[in-house]
Image (cartoon, rainbow, N blue to C red):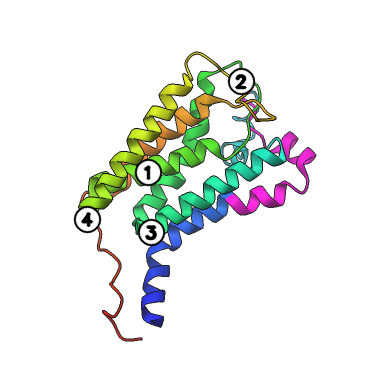
Amino acid sequence: MARRVRLMLCRHHAWLGVGLLLVVPSLLIALRPGLARMALAWVPALVWSEPWRWWSAAWVHLSTRHLLANLAGAALLLLLGWVARLPREAAWAWALAWPLTHLGLLLAPDLLRYGGLSGVLHAGVAVAAVALVRDAALRRDRVLGALLLAGLCAKVLGERAWAHTLVTPPGWDIAVAPLAHASGTVCGALAALLLVRSRPWSPAPPPGSSAG
């Protein structure tokens, strides 16, 4: 049993690590939101002179509801990575897509400030979906990946990022930037195609296959 646990942790630590790098600073920064919004949020006029914003923008949330919704999405994505046994390369793809997601925001020069995990979470879903479609050993996992990718694309197209810089969905207390979701989806898919190995990864050992 102990050996199986060690194998599972080794298999998934990279994906979980990227997730924790997104979640933990978001929680810590929420304790001092005024300072964070000023120093860490995405501000197009400052991103070249203050390059940390390419990463730190994901940690800044504009309301408690915004933070809680993104934390719930992050938890589901981390669970997906664990259950689907995503390989280490998928975590590297997600990490690469993190700053590239914010690069796409430059396509909307009237977006003067942005913060939140949602764009990078869309990138993570795209990475997971493409990795499963391309390389999962089991047919059911490839089908899951295809469904995830189709649902993600339908969501992004339905948001019509080309038509609206900001929208306020019903029940939300902040405006949302659909372009961040579209950029994350594209960057995540491309990063997965670039970095995830084009061969099935080994599934986790079944229960009872090794000594405890």
Residue 106 shown left or right of residue 146 in the figure: right
Return the disc, 2 or 4, that comes first in the chain's sequence. 2
Element marked by disc 3: helix
Residue labelled with disc 2: 111
Residue labelled with disc 1: 127
Q: Nearer the viewer, mark 3 or mark 1?
A: 3
Q: Residues within 10 Å of mark 3 (few under 14, many from 20)?
A: few
The amino acid at mark 2 is Leu
Q: Residues within 10 Å of mark 4 (few under 14, many from 20)?
A: few
Picture residue at 22% right of the left edge, 55% below the top: 138
Q: Is residue 72 above or below residue 184?
A: below
Magenta-drawn segment: 23-44
Return the disc, 3 or 2, that comes first in the chain's sequence. 3
Residues under labels 2 and 1: Cα distance? 26 Å
Residue labelled with disc 4: 138
Residues under labels 4 and 3: Cα distance? 13 Å
Residues under labels 3 and 2: Cα distance? 37 Å
Residue 51 shown left or right of residue 78 in the figure: right
Q: Say whether marks 3 and 1 touch (CB < 8 Å).
A: no
Q: Nearer the viewer, mark 2 or mark 4?
A: 4
Q: Say whether marks 4 and 1 touch (CB < 8 Å).
A: no
Label number found at residue 15: none
Residue labelled with disc 3: 83
Residues under labels 3 and 1: Cα distance? 15 Å
Residue 24 falls in image quadrant: bottom right
Picture residue at 56% right of the left edge, 53% below the top: 21
Q: Is residue 212 magenta?
A: no
Question: Residue lying farthest front?
Answer: 171
Q: Residues within 10 Å of mark 1 (few under 14, many from 20)?
A: many
The amino acid at mark 1 is Val
